[in-house]
Image (cartoon, coloured by chain):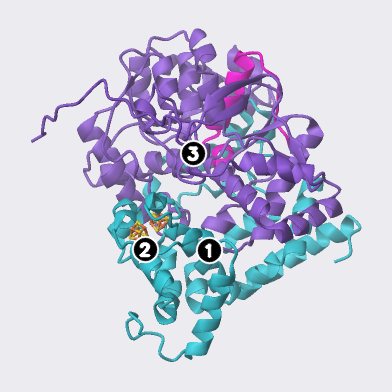
Chain colours: A cyan, B purple
Amino acid sequence: MTLAPNTYTDIPYEEKAKLIEEVMADHRYGEHLYGCYECGICVAACPSARFYDFSPRKIAQAAARQDVELMYEQMNDDVWNCSQCFSCTRCPRGNNPGGIITVLREVAVRNGLASARDALEGYGRVVYKIMSTGTQVSPDMLQPNAFPDWGPHVKAISDNVETWRKALPPETLHTTSTAWNVDEKTIIELYLIWQATGVMDMIGEVDEGLHMILEDVMEDVLDEAGYET
Amino acid sequence: MSLELPVLKERRAERKNAPPPTEDVREKVFEIEAQGDWIVHRVPDDHVEVFTKYGRVKKIPRQNLWHHKSCGQCGHIPGYSTAIFWLMRKLGLAYEDPTDQTSCTAWNYYASATSNAAAQAGVAMRNFGAAYEAGNYPLIHCGTSYGHYKEVREELIHDPELRKQVKGIMEKLGKPFVMPEEIVHYSEWVYAMRRELANLKVLDFSDITATVHPACHYHKLVVEDAIYDRDIYDGQRTAVVTAVVEALGANIGEYSTWYDCCGFGFRHILVERDFTRSFAIERKIEVMKKEANPDVVLTHDTGCVTTLDQSQFAGRAHDRDVGIPVLSDAQFAALAMGAHPYKVCQLHWHNTDNKPLLEKMGIDHESKWAEFEEELRMIEAGEKEFLTWEDADG
Ligand code: SF4
Ligand code: SF4
C-alpha cells in the first residue's frame, strides 16, 4: 500500500520502481537509512520544514517503507526544497534524510525528470561558471539586477569592482570573472576529470544548451593542449 | 516570562572510558596506505594537538600551509580570505596561496546534483595531490569544502571501486594519489593559534558582545571530526570561534537557535531567496537581537557570513528587528590585532552597517576609509597597480 497522494498516475509503476531501485543501489544510501522512529526530531531541526510543505521525517519514512509511489512523488515535488544543511543528522536513529535527498536529486537529474529541469532553470550560468573556470562564485556575479533584495550596496560593488579587486593584498585575488586566478594547467586537469567521470552526460540530461556550450569550451582548450577529444 | 531553573554548576558530563561511537577513519586512511593504494600526507611536526567531539586528538599544522581558498569568500567577501592570510603573516608563519587550486565543486553536489561521486572525489584528490606536490599542507577555508571532502574521504575509504577509478584519473593527470592525515578547516587553525593571536592584540574588546553561528557543514557533517573543548560550553557544542572570542577578551552572547542553519540553502540563495532571508531574519538575527543584543555576529563559513549579512537589508525594509554586522572569526581576530578595516578586512564588501561596531572597538573608521580611498585613487590614477601587503600594513 502506498501513502502517496494520487499523483503522477500517468507514469507506469515500473518506471518509478526503476528509478527508486537506482536510488537504493547507490552505495551512500545504506549509510543514510536505518529505519525510522517517527519521532520528528529531524523536522524540528529542519529549516525547510518551517517554510515549505516539506518533512525530512516523511522522506525517511517513505524510504524505510520502500514506498515507490511516495518516493517518486517526493523525488519530483519535495527534494528541491531541502537546504542540504544536514541539521537532520540529529536523528537518534542515525538517519541522514538530507543525504537520502542528495541521492534522490542525483537520480532525478541523471534521468532528466521534468521537475529537475524546472528546479535547475536559471542555474545554467552557475553550473557553467564552476565547470568552465574552476571557481564557483566570482565578483562579477554581484549585479544589482541579480540581487535587488541586497540593496544599493551591490551596485556600489559592481560599479567599483575593477578597482576594488586591485585593492586586495593577495595577488591571486586581482580577478573579476573568477574568485581567484586559476592557472591553465589546472583548468585542463579539471576538464579531464569531467570527461572521465560522465558528469557531462548528467548536464546533457537537464540542460542541452549548457551541455553544448561546455563541450565546445572544453574541446577548444583540450585540443589546443594536445588531448584527444 | 522566563523560568528560573536551578542549575547544578558543578555538573560536568564525563565520557569516562566509553569508546567513541564512531570509527576513526584516520586508521583506515593509514591502512589503505599500507595496502599501497594511496600516499598519506602527514601533518608536519610543527602542529598543535586539539580534541574532537568524542575526545580523540586532532593535529592542526601551524605553518607551511597550502591555502585551499573558498570561492564565496574570495569572490564576494574577500576580506575574509585576506584576514586569514594576514593572521599568518602577522605570526611570521610560511604559507602558500596557490593558483593550481580549484573550488571543491560541492555546489554541483548540494545545490544542483549535477555531479557524481567520482567527479567530486576527483576534484578533491586533484587539489590534495597539488598540495602534496608543493610540499605544503592543505588548509580548507570553506566549511562546505571541509565537510564535503570528509564525506568524499569516507566514500573513498568504503568503496574500493571508486578509489580505483579516481586513482586511475589521477594517474592520467600525472598527479599523486594522496589523502591528508587530517582534513583541517581554517577555523581550527584559528582556534589552535588563539592564544598566540591574543598575545598580539592591540585593542580592548571587553565591551564587545558576539553571538556565534556554528556552520552546519562544519559540525553536522562527519560530526566526530569537529573540535570540542571541555572549557567551552562544557564540551557540548563545537568550540571553534567561541574559544577565539573568549581568548581575545570579548563576550559571548547566548541565543536559543544556535543549532539552526543560517538559511543559505545552496539553491535557495540563488533562486528562492525569499526562504533564505525569512529564515535568516526570523530564526537567527531577530532571535539573537532579542535574546543577546550582540554587537556583532561571528561565524566561520562563507555562506553563513553572506546569508546572515545580506539578508538583513530586506529585513530593514520590512521594519524587522535587524542590524547586526556579520564578520568571520578571522576578521574579528585581525581587527583586535590592529588590522586595517578596509585594506585588510575589506569591510566595504559587507552590507549591514558596521560603523557602530568599529566605533565601539575604538577604530576611527572615517580616517581609515580616507586612507583606503587614497589607495583607490592611486590605483585609478595609475600611480600603483595594486594594493600590496606592505601598503596594507602601512
Ligand atoms: S538537510 Fe534538508 S531535510 Fe535535512 S534538515 Fe536540512 S533542509 Fe531539512
Ligand atoms: S529524527 Fe530520525 S527517527 Fe526521528 S523521524 Fe526523523 S528520520 Fe525518523
For label 2, the residue is A36
Relative placement, left or right, of B234 versus A109 is: left
Q: Which x, y percent locates residue B299? A: 43, 33
CB of mark 2 near ligand 2 (< 8 Å): yes
Amino acid marked by disc 1? Gly
The residue sitting at 58% across, 52% down in the picture is B106
Say if A62 sits above or below B240 in the image. below
Q: How many residues crowd around disc 1 within 10 Å: few (fewer than 14), some, or many (20 or more)?
A: few
Q: Are marks 2 and 1 on the same chain?
A: yes
- Quadrant housing residue A6: bottom left
Which element carries disc 1, helix, strand or loop?
A: helix
For label 1, the residue is A30
- Quadrant housing residue A26: bottom right
Relative placement, left or right, of B129 versus B317 is: right
Q: How many residues crowd around disc 2 within 10 Å: few (fewer than 14), some, or many (20 or more)?
A: many
Q: Chain of mark 2?
A: A
**Disc ID at residue B20:** 3
Which element carries disc 2, helix, strand or loop?
A: loop
Q: Measure how far apart labels 2 and 1 are at the Cα level.
A: 13 Å
Say if B366 sits above or below A137 in the image. above
Pair 3/1: label in front = 3
Q: How many residues crowd around disc 3 within 10 Å: few (fewer than 14), some, or many (20 or more)?
A: few
Which element carries disc 3, helix, strand or loop?
A: loop
